[in-house]
Image (cartoon, grey):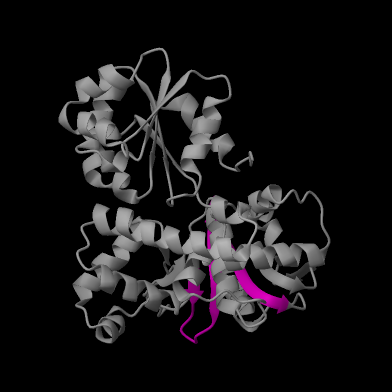
Amino acid sequence: MLIPRDAEGNFRKLDAIYKIVAVIGPRQAGKTTFLREQMAKGRDVAYVSLDDPNAKSIFDSDVKKFEQQYLAKNRTTIADEVQYGKEAGIKLKYLADEGYKLWVSASSQALLEAGVLSYLTGRVGLLILYNFSLNEFLSAKGQKSYVDSILQRHVWEHVVYGGYPAVVLAELPEDKKTILKNLFTTALLKDTFMTFGINDQETLERLSKYLAANIGAEINYGSISKKLGISTPTLQKYISALEKSYIIARVRPYFTNKGLELAKQPKLYFNDTGMRNAIMDTFPKELENEGKMFENYVFNEIQKAGFSPNYWKSKSKAEVDFIVQKEGEIIPIEVKLYSEGKPGKSLRSFIEKYRPKKALIVVYRGKKGKTRLSGCSVETITADEIHERLF
C-alpha cells in the first residue's frame, strides 16, 4: 500500500541540489520503502544494502571494487544502511567526486558524526524521515474526511501504538504489540548496542524503562545515576546513544536571559509513543489519564513538521510545554487532553512576557476557536491541524 510521505517535496529539492541525499531516521520508519518508491517514478535507480555481508565486505575493503560492482555513472544508486560501512565519509566523498549520484540511508545518527559528515560538506543533503505523522496515518487508514469522534478514535490509536508503518498497517492489536516489541529489541541491538559501542545491554534496557516511565520530566543525571546504580558519564553516554538511534529526544529549555530563567536541564520524550508503550508493556484503552503521553505525542507531531521545539519554565515555575522558533518568531504551544479554549496561567505568563504574535493550544478533545490576549492570537486546535498552523 503506497502512502504518500510529507517529506517527498523536501527530498526532491535536495535531490536537485546535491550529489548525495542522505535519508536518516528511526529504524523501520519507511526510509527504504520511501527511496524505492522514488525508483518507481521513472528514474534509473539501483539498490544495494550494507546489511548484505557481501556488499559490506567489498565496501569495507576496497571502495573502487564497490564502485565497479554496484555503481554506474548513468544512474542513481541507493546505498542502504551506510552507517555499517568502514570509513563511510571519505568513501562517499570519493564516489560523489567521481560523479556518482547516491541516495543513502541510515538508521542512526552515526552518519552525522564528524568522522563522516566532515568529508561530505557541500555534497550531501540531509532528510530526516520519521514515522507516520497523523496526516500520513489518516491516509494509511483511508480517512479523507471525519467528524470529531472519528478523529479522536484515530488519534487514540496513533498515540497508543505509534506511527511505525508496519504497526499502522497491522490490523490486530496483538500484532501491533508484537511488532513494537521486536522493533525495540532490534533498535537496541543493531543501532544503539552495536553502532555506539554500548557494552551492557541489561543496563540499557533498565534505563529505557526508567525513561519510558518519566516522559516529559526534566533529566536529573545525578538522581538517575543513583537510582540505576551507574556512573553519570555512563548514563550520559547511554542517553546520547539512545538519542542518536532515534529512540528518544531531548528538548532544551527556552530562554533569552539566563539570569531570569532557572530551567537548564533538558526534558526527555520518545520519538514514538508506541515504542514507549511497548517498553512499558502498557497500552491504555483511553487517554483520559494520559496527559504526559499526549504531550509526548504532540512533541512528535511538531518534530515531524520539521521543528525542534524548546520548553519554557520561569523563575516562578510557570511552564509552557513547547516553544517553536520560526523565522525570528516564537510560537508557544500548550498541550491539554481537554480544554475550553482558554489559555492557562502559564501560557498567559509567557505571552505577557514575550509578546508573541501567535500561540496554540493543542487538545485531544474540547472547544476549538480563537481568542486574543495581549495582542497575541491564541488558537485552540486538534492534532491534525498542527502542521498547517506551523506553516
Q: Is residue 217 visible?
A: yes
Query: Magenta span has 4?
Result: no
- The residues colored magenta run 311-338
Residue 81 x, y percent position in the rendering: 35, 40
Q: Is residue 335 magenta?
A: yes
- For the point 25% across and 32% down, the residue is 54
Q: Which residue is pictured at 24% across the width and 36% down the height?
A: 88
Q: Spot the residue most to the left.
A: 61
Residue 241, quarter of picture:
bottom left
Residue 318's image quarter? bottom right
Residue 49 placement, left or right of 346: left
Q: Nearer the viewer, residue 366 or 28?
A: 28
Main secondary structure found in the magenta portion: strand
Residue in view at x 26 percent, y 36 percent: 53
The image shows residue 165, relative to residue 35, as above or below, that is below
Q: Position of residue 14 (x, y in %)?
A: 48, 32
Q: What residue occupies the far top of the structure in this picture?
A: 74
Which part of the image, by quadrant, shows the N terminus? top right
Would residue 332 be visible to someone looking at this image?
Answer: no
Compared across the picture, whether 335 is left or right of 296 comes to right
Q: What residue is rendered at 55% in x and 77% in y?
A: 292
Q: Is residue 294 above or below residue 52?
A: below
Q: Total marks drawn?
A: 0
> Which residue appears farthest toward the right when viewing the image?
147
Foreground residue among 56 and 269: 56
Counting from the top left corner in percent of width and height, residue 106 is at 37, 43
Q: Position of residue 333 (x, y in %)?
A: 61, 67
